[in-house]
Image (cartoon, grey):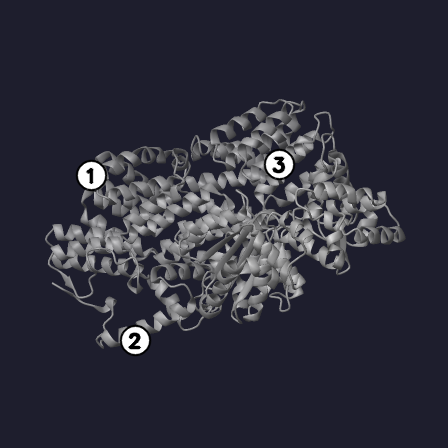
Amino acid sequence: MTGTSVLRGRTEEMTTALRMLRATARGGHGQMLIITGEPGMGKSELARTIAAEAGALRFRTGAANADAIAQLSPGAPILLSLRHGPHPLLTGAELTELVAQVDEPLLLLEAIGNRLETATAAGPVLLLLDDLEEADQLTRFLLRSLPFRLASCPVVWLLVGRTAEDSVLNDLSALNGSRAGQIPVERLELQPLSAEAILDLAHDRFGTSPPLAAADLLVQVDGSPLLAVQVIDTLTGMGDSVDEMAWRSTSTTACVPRQVTQELHRTLLGLSPQAVDMIEAVAVLGQPVTPRDVQDLTGLSRVQTATVLDEAIGAGVLDRRSGRIAFRYRLVREAVYADMAEPTRRALHRRCARQLVAVDAESSMIAVHAREGIEPGETECAAIVMQSAVDLAASTPHTAGDLAITAFRALRPTDPAYPTLGEQCVRVLGLVQRCDDAITIGDLVLAHLDDGDSIGRVELVLARALWLAGLWESSSVRCSSGLARSDLTAPMRARLTALQALVDSRLQGAEAMRPQAEAALAAARRLDDREAQFTALHALAEISRNGADHAGSLSYFRQLRARSQPVFFAQEIMALQNLDRYRDAEALLKQAWSESAEHPAAVLPALLYAQIWQDYNLGRLDDAEAGARRLLTLARELGSRMCELEAASIVSMVALLRGRLDDARHELALDGNGPTADDEAHAPPLLLTRGWLTAAEGEPAAAIRLLSPLLRSAHADRDAWPWKPGWLPVLARIGIAEDDAEFLEQAQSLAEIGATRNPGVSSFEGISAHIQGLVGRDGDLLHRAVDVLTDGPRPLLLAGAREDLGKHLLGEQRRTDGIAQLDQAWEAYQLAGAIGPMLRVQQVMRKAGARRADWAATEPGPAVGWAALTQAERTVARLMGTGYSNKQVAAELKVSTNTVGTHARSIFTKLGVRSRSHLSNQYHDQIVATQTHTPDHRTTPMATPVTT
């Protein structure tokens, strides 16, 4: 049966697909076509025909299927599609390189994105991914990101799967709805064909109307093109005997809807027991297999396997494809699998797992069968599944958590492996942030333990899980419970003591816990216990940072990194930033990004966070926002709530500096998903940004009520927020606006502590002088703040001090000096794109009678059009408009391709364009318009003089 015949009933769907293909071939932008429907609706046949049409339009195409049994082969559908087709997008060596990164999802995401972008430089690409209802977690993760990251590239994503409420395809449709305008999406829900269309299919094949008996049979397929094709194939082979059918052909009867299972029984009853065993084994394996696989699983000899295989093929159940054995039709495989007795099915899965272990297969593949074969008391299967959970915790956390729980539930308390596997289960659940499950299982394990060290290990794992979740009080209780045991070994006591010092530093304050952390470190070194040393150093690093001792914090973080803990590389960089060593931080960031492929994926969000603060503190707001948006996307993809809160705060802070209060408010709403009171308790920047926004909206009193509890508790050194970029000057301005003496006193006190504990660090000394000058209306202190910050690296801190000094000088009737300071503040704000404070300074200068030819309007600029682009976006648009790829733009500007992609998406949205060619046309039109309407002068905004 040809695809053309099947498409007789799918004309409208095919027309939609061809329109999308031609649009991509012409315009070069990404699109997504989602095809869904119930089994047998012809989804795969339609998709293959669309892919063939794409090939005719000179698309490079690739295709792959997800597979239920291979769900734990992470990312297989996407990876295999890149290697498929007459002109693969990857070489064999490149595929091997990508497969090696499946345990590092963020690295893999970036690598695939780069490869696809490179491939599209030679022409459009279509990727067909079928059976996505069976997609593994890594494939889902990649699909939630790649189409949108490559929206400006000519890639058509042809995604096929069954209709289901929890389908990844539904997730993609919803996700695109929250990213409006990023990528056009069409969804085709295939319905059953009409009886007329089914009979037309038969007419195409027979060359005439089908005989009456055949027509009656075809009407029974309930509009299923797949079953219709199976019936028609059989009828074609029967020739003139169609009218005399007696329902004896197993190939025919297996096609009749609502009778598939019954007729399958009849078919299997007519086969030898060995043939039935082979058919069931192939059904359990779930994918095309070699004859040797069948031999190993069934115990048949080579000759017996060949004989039995011929029998199954002759019955129309199995088929040979490229040297492998598979079911002739997928629905038949599903019917066989579903109809097997559960004990038989489970036993076959266990046999598969053991066989895969014997050949040293990937643990994820082994776990698929071990999980399906697991039963209470099956310790061997439980251990296999648990090991896979451990292996997958970083790459597919949701799957890892489910596997760990499945393995644990198969254990009996009397099993010798119960404590060890129970501890592993709690550890995995803690790592994947399923804290409630970790506590439930941990308490169950503890109830069956008696010796102190075993109990201490479980309490330690639970305490760490609670720490990661931000549940510090509960974590401290777990540490105390473990330490209360008198039968702990010395190393276990040292580990629990060190962890309690780390946890309690968030509850009792940094200095209160420093002696305990130091004692724990001394004990760990004496015992030569690596884990206890690591935890104690971590505690001391956080205690020092939260207490504004940044030199001490840097020392401890460096010791942690020297102990092969790359996750602390980012913390070391941020410690350098806190010491105003931005040049050193920049050098380490460049080193970190150049070596990013060598770091585990868990390190990348932390590095990105350090890069964001580097850009923000140095006044590179465009880059800071692009990085924060990338971090926000990654946080939501990885399910990291704390990371999401931090990233949303930074995006909102940039919006506030740009004077876009509505945007800031929108970002803090977290797409309608919060924030909660717990969120604000564990992420102070979120509360601080909300207070800043409240004050900016003209309600400083409400902002002070919101922020006062946080400000009062800051002296306990439980968190590092007072020593992060520029919060104290923001709070001081809020206090000045409301003339709240207590609030100002708290801010001033914190600023003085920061300067005292970090002597010689310009930012801390300058902030202290600045706030003292503001509170005391002391011009000398404000002058000192400007002098100190002039030698520092942070332009926006200096601009803020100049602004306040300028206002003070105007108040003292020193108009010329005041305007000079305000003018320099205006230029610094304008250069950084901080439109909000720039307009604030502009209004003060205007009231003082100063004028500047390049002053902006009194409101922030437009949200759409070329005028809405930031300076960085204009640079990226210029390069893209002249034909640069994302990779070439990144190389030219010395930024990452992900940063370019973030800018590109913003450019497309603001300009209302869908493709690079559309952008190029608009860019050249803009050049013509500028040359036509702009006077020929060479004056730049930075050179425009101030007149008084």
Kind of residue indicated by mark 2: Val
Viewer-side label of 1, 2? 2
Kind of residue indicated by mark 3: Arg
Q: Residues within 10 Å of mark 3 (few under 14, many from 20)?
A: few
- In this rendered view, identify the residue nearer to me: 633 or 913: 913
Mark 2, secondary structure of its residue: helix
The residue wearing badge 2 is 928
Contact between marks 3 and 1 (CB within 8 A): the answer is no
Viewer-side label of 3, 1? 1
Contact between marks 2 and 3 (CB within 8 A): the answer is no
Residue 867 lies, in percent from the top left, at 28, 63
Taking 164 as reference, is 341 above or below it?
above
**Residue 588 visible (yes or no):** no
- In this rendered view, identify the residue nearer to me: 396 or 500: 396
- In this rendered view, identify the residue nearer to me: 67 or 850: 67
The residue wearing badge 3 is 526
Disc nearer the start of the sequence (2/3): 3
Kind of residue indicated by mark 1: Glu
Task: Report the quarter where the C terminus lies.
Answer: bottom left
The residue wearing badge 1 is 738
